[in-house]
């Protein structure tokens, strides 16, 4: 059995409210290693509920992503882990230091930062609207591009900067940052703002890996392929299976296991890297 060396650490996982999502799976996997987990999420007006009655697709995905995080927290606690909820709007730059203050008060200083929260509205350079996987695809606008930038690029950058500042201030010599991108980042027709801002996140991550290394902090990127977080409908499965060499749709725990590895002592000599976690969906 491998000892990840994570027991007693504190992690912040953003976008961790959906019981079907990648963030929730990451939080649970870290908690299973003895990590106290802060679950950050955008507050909404929808209470947790069961999604079993909804078929995979737009409705199920929308319901899950609007959850208030209690299911994720309660599952972690039921398994013997430690987790606390922290509602926050990461599109507000002032929210970043306040969030870390609240976490430090409740759990202690953050050792592991996982930037998983994302904003995505499918958009296009084409003037006509259409459909792509889920949701209506709309023509690109300045407001839409700015909204994607605020959550997908600026917020992780500000979190990394504030995290680094605090690590230096307390004299810490160990830290982990894992940023969640997408395998569509280099070019994502029909989700152009989402892809572009995730690609920016990858660049920010590599710069952070170089500049934070003297403080003992590693910074790496996980690039998932199609992962079933509620949005993949039954009629999409065959296409994704065909396009994926390992022949199935991804699961949130496929991503979570890689994040745990990157946070672990086994990944101590790995930084500035991007790992494609998609069953071979994208290999270059």
Image (cartoon, rainbow, N blue to C red):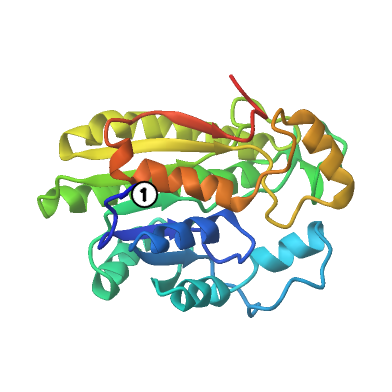
User: Is 276 above or below relative to 96?
Assistant: above
27 is higher (above) or lower (below) than 255: below
> Which type of secondary structure does the marked residue at label 1 adopt?
loop
Toward which corner of the image does residue 110 lie, by quadrant?
bottom left
State the image quarter where residue 63 is shown: bottom right
Residue sitting nearer the eye, 217 or 35: 35
- 49 in relation to 264, above or below: below
Viewport quadrant of the C terminus:
top right
Residue found at the very far front of the displayed protein: 1
**Closer to the camera, 22 or 102?**
22
Q: How many marks?
A: 1
> Residue 129's spot in the image, x, y percent?
86, 41
Locate residue 217, reporting x and y percent. Answer: 24, 40
Q: 63 left or right of 41?
A: right
Residue 42 percent location from the top left of the image: 53, 66
Residue at label 1? 1
Q: Is residue 247 left or right of residue 175?
A: right
Mark 1 burial class by Cα count in 10 Å: few <14, some 14-19, many 20+: few
> Does any portion of residue 92 appear in the rendered image?
no
């Amino acid at each position: 059995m491998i000892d990840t060396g994570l027991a007693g650490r504190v992690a912040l996982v953003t976008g961790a409210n959906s019981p079907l999502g990648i963030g929730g799976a990451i939080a649970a996997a870290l908690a299973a290693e003895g990590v106290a987990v802060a679950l950050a999420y955008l507050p909404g007006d929808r209470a947790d509920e069961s999604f079993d009655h909804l078929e995979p697709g737009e409705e199920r995905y929308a319901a899950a992503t609007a959850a208030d995080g209690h299911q994720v927290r309660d599952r972690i606690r039921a398994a013997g882990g430690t987790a606390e909820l922290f509602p926050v709007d990461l599109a507000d730059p002032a929210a970043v230091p306040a969030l870390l203050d609240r976490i430090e008060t409740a759990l202690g200083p953050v050792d592991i930062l996982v930037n998983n929260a994302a904003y995505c509205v499918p958009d296009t350079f084409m003037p006509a609207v259409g459909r792509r996987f889920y949701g209506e695809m709309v023509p690109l606008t300045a407001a839409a591009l700015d909204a994607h930038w605020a959550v997908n690029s600026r917020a992780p950058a500000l979190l990394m900067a504030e995290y680094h500042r605090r690590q230096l201030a307390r004299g810490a010599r160990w830290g982990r940052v894992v940023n969640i991108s997408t395998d569509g980042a280099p070019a994502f027709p029909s989700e152009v703002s989402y892809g572009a801002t995730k690609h920016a996140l990858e660049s920010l991550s590599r710069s952070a890996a170089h500049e934070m290394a003297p403080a003992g902090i590693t910074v790496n990127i996980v690039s998932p392929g199609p992962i079933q977080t509620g949005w993949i409908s039954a009629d999409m499965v065959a296409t994704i299976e065909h396009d994926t060499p390992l022949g199935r749709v991804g699961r949130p725990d496929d991503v979570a296991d890689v994040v745990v590895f990157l946070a672990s002592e086994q990944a101590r000599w790995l930084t500035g890297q991007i790992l494609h976690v998609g069953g071979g969906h994208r290999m270059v």
